[in-house]
Amino acid sequence: MVYPVYTETTYCRDCYKCVRSCPVKAIQIKDGSAVIIKDRCIFCGKCVAICPNSAKKIRSDLSRAQMLVKSKKRVICSLAPSFAAEFQGHEDAVLSAIISLGFSDISETAIGATIVSAAIDMYANEHDGKCSWISTACPSVVELVRKYYPEAVNRLAKVPSPLQTHCAYLRSIYGNDIGIVFIGPCIAKKNEADTTPGYPDIAITFDELRSWLKEERIDLDSIDTSNKVAFAPAKAGIATLYPVERGQIVTSKIWGEKPFCRDALALSGVNEIHDVLAQGRDNDPFLELLGCEGGCINGPVSDKCKSLAVRKNAIAQFTESRISSGEKLFEPKEEFVREVLDKGYSILGGSQPASDTNFNKKFSEEEIKQALLDLGKSTKADELNCGGCGYNTCRDMAIAYLSGMAEVEMCVTKMRKEAQSKVDMLLRTIPNAVVIVNRDLNIADCNINFLKIFGDMDESLLDDSMLSLVSGLPLERFVPFYEKFSDEFYAQKRNQYRLHYKDKFLRVTFFLVEKNRLLGAMFDDITSPTVKRETVVKKAEDVIQKSLETVQQIASLLGENAAETEIMLNSLIDAFSVHSDSNSDGFTIDDEVEV
């Protein structure tokens, strides 16, 4: 089965944005493409949100959900409480639409959250109000602990997640033959469905729900909501606050009413969670940790057109209206809460898998130093920590390179230096004179041969140090015909010219280095063949002169034949002559020849 998040490599464009955004650096650069390493991924979805070319994909489970609805007699939708923020103003319409898709019932995932909070309260009451567990409400956080902080696995709450607990509760009252489809803003819930089959059977996102509605041509604005859809088995209460930061703590009957509670703390965002787990202690308070900044309402596929403040407010209003309505809200039975607490993950038919995987492999200083050398970092000054590769420091990049997660080509500064070195080597060794100018017609680069022709300086003084002094100077200080460069910047085709400059005949070939930014010109010295041609023309002129003298002497005898001889000899001169336009600057430019 395809993992919940994957890479469409044909769309990947070597931008390394996903590497930069991934909080656990689970992206491997392989042959220039950014590939997600499934064993390292925590399914937070940040790479999906940041990818500019949509190369990071979320696995679609829509067709599987549609098949389940058709094949099962009873299929229940476990609806995430964040739907009130996602579809604000259309809450009743969404419920009616889900039923019209073929679901038998809709039940709130928040019911499972209510049971989880009751189980944690029960544990804390039995331990003097103390509980140093880490919440399992967020599957991304659970994956983070298992894969990157195995020493903290024993601190994960001994109760299943709210979704898993909800599914277990639904099966306890409706039987194991039901199908359960979770709908919410979370990608990691797909992994939860994969690893604990049936709890739920399938997880789809709000985006997939929208696609489903579109397929069925269901418009939320046009749905009749006069017949209210009732939640099965009842409406959840304050646990609908779970998708916002500190929502789980507020749900607790022990900690919820304490404005300053030191026994329970809430954090959101993987970077913040990294810090607290790295410095964690066994006597820490209960930690409500949510991978998405602000909570589940800011999930990877949530509606980003609405601000986080608007979404938080929507959840608060949704919960407040329920509590103040006077309706009978869900209250879990104590015996089921006790079963969840005592059995833990075995209530799902298996125990919670612990992890002894630790991807933070240690490398020796010698190995890291050698890796830095491979990346072109021979001194501390070379470690620019520019972040272009996606890693915060050159040292982090070197470790990733040693781990097989990164390639040398990811180092922007190294590749730029190598490219510049190749350009410099080419300019130094090419026998032609070369100059590269920017659109302001200032010299960006040139070689010694260019200065030999146009520099007006003693050749014995020319060396590589002079090139840096020339860089940035106006081209017109060296080349009289600099206006031609302006024309060539925006020409559809590059042109080739021949010119006579001082005592040299040159062929000029223009080439585009970077569109609308850098233009180059190569000067080929064709003086020798041109001089030979000029010699032929001079000798032809001498022949003409002598012939004309002879013709004048016998003009009376030859008549018109003399004129024809003159025309013929002048044609010979024309054939060997260079027709050119002269100017007052002492150089000539031949007619343009398109190449």
Image: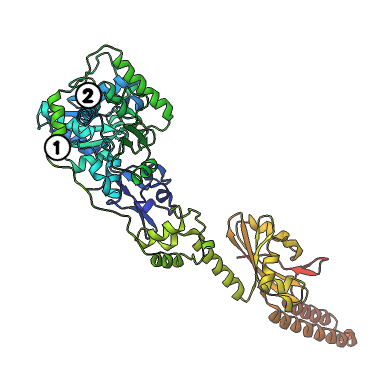
- Give the side of residue 303 with respect to residue 233, left or right: right
What residue did someone put label 2 on? 99
* Residue 562, x across and y down, in percent: 83, 82
Nearest to the observer: residue 124 or residue 490: 124
Q: Tell me, yes or no, if residue 82 can be seen here.
A: no
Q: How is the image coloured?
A: rainbow
Where is residue 254 drawn, in percent x and y? 27, 25
Give residue 158's position: percent from left, percent from top: 20, 37
**Mark 1 crowd level (few <14, some 14–19, many ≥20, 10 Å Cα):** some
First-in-chain label (1 vs 2) = 2
227 to 557, vertically: above or below: above
Give the labeled residue for mark 1: 348
The CA distance from mark 1 to mark 2 is 27 Å
Observer-nearest of 347 and 184: 347
Q: Quarter of the image holding residue 50?
A: top left
Query: Type of residue at label 1?
Result: Leu
Please indicate, yes or no, whether residue 62 appears anywhere in the rendered image: yes
